[in-house]
């Protein structure tokens, strides 16, 4: 499970050092892909396969499903971290998410997310007040 917030740096070769707490789950391979709100999703290879199985069940007759699947999978890149826990973020994904040297990596349950620090701070500032003042059930069965 991915939890927490981290502030690694992107090196000159487009690599990031994965947070040590994520290493056990990601050491055998990761899949990076486009995420919502212009971040990069980071899945373990096994979790990505599970996500792919769910996506395969979408009916081909559903245009929104086809569109989502195309964008999600065309941006996917499978990577193997090196011995220093570094993984290369492909240029296309760095551009998509507006990544530069300053990054924020958050745990999001079954995945990690890589954000430009500027984008994360703006997102957090916009959403935190509503989160703090939530008075009704947002996700069925939670709280």
Image (cartoon, grey):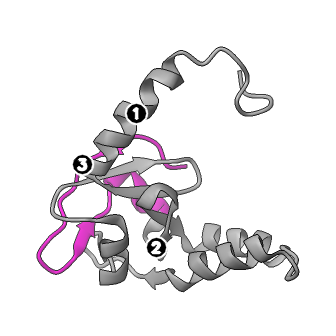
Distance from the alpha carbon under mark 1 to that under mark 3: 12 Å
In the picture of the structure, the residue carrying the numbered disc 3 is 118
Q: Is residue 54 magenta?
A: no
In the picture of the structure, the residue carrying the numbered disc 1 is 126
Q: Name the spot of residue 6 as percent of width and height, x first.
A: 29, 46
Residue 117, relative to residue 35: is it above or below? above
Distance from the alpha carbon under mark 2 to that under mark 1: 26 Å
Q: What's the residue at 88%, 80% (across, down)?
A: 61
Name which of mark 3 and mark 2 comes first in the sequence. Answer: 2
Helix, strand or loop for disc 2: strand
Q: Name the spot of residue 134 as percent of width and height, x first.
A: 60, 19
Q: Is there any visible trace of residue 84 in the rendered image?
A: no
In the picture of the structure, the residue carrying the numbered disc 2 is 32
Distance from the alpha carbon under mark 3 to that under mark 2: 20 Å
Q: Name the spot of residue 69 as percent of width and height, x first.
A: 67, 77
Q: Nearer the viewer, mark 3 or mark 2?
A: 3
Helix, strand or loop for disc 1: helix
Extent of the magenta region: 1-25
Q: Is residue 23 magenta?
A: yes
Q: What's the residue at 88%, 77% (across, down)?
A: 59
């Amino acid at each position: 499970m991915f939890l927490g917030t981290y502030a690694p740096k992107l090196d000159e070769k487009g690599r990031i050092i994965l947070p040590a707490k994520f290493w056990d789950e990601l050491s055998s391979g990761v899949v990076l892909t486009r995420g919502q709100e212009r971040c990069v999703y980071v899945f373990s290879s096994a979790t990505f396969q599970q996500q792919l199985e769910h996506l395969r069940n979408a009916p081909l007759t559903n245009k929104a499903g086809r569109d989502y699947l195309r964008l999600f999978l065309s941006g996917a890149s499978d990577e193997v971290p090196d011995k220093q826990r570094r993984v290369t973020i492909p240029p296309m994904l760095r551009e998509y998410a507006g990544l530069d040297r300053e990054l924020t990596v958050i745990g999001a349950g079954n995945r990690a997310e890589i954000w430009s620090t500027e984008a994360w701070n703006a997102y957090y500032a916009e959403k935190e007040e509503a989160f703090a003042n939530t008075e009704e059930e947002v996700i069925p069965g939670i709280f």
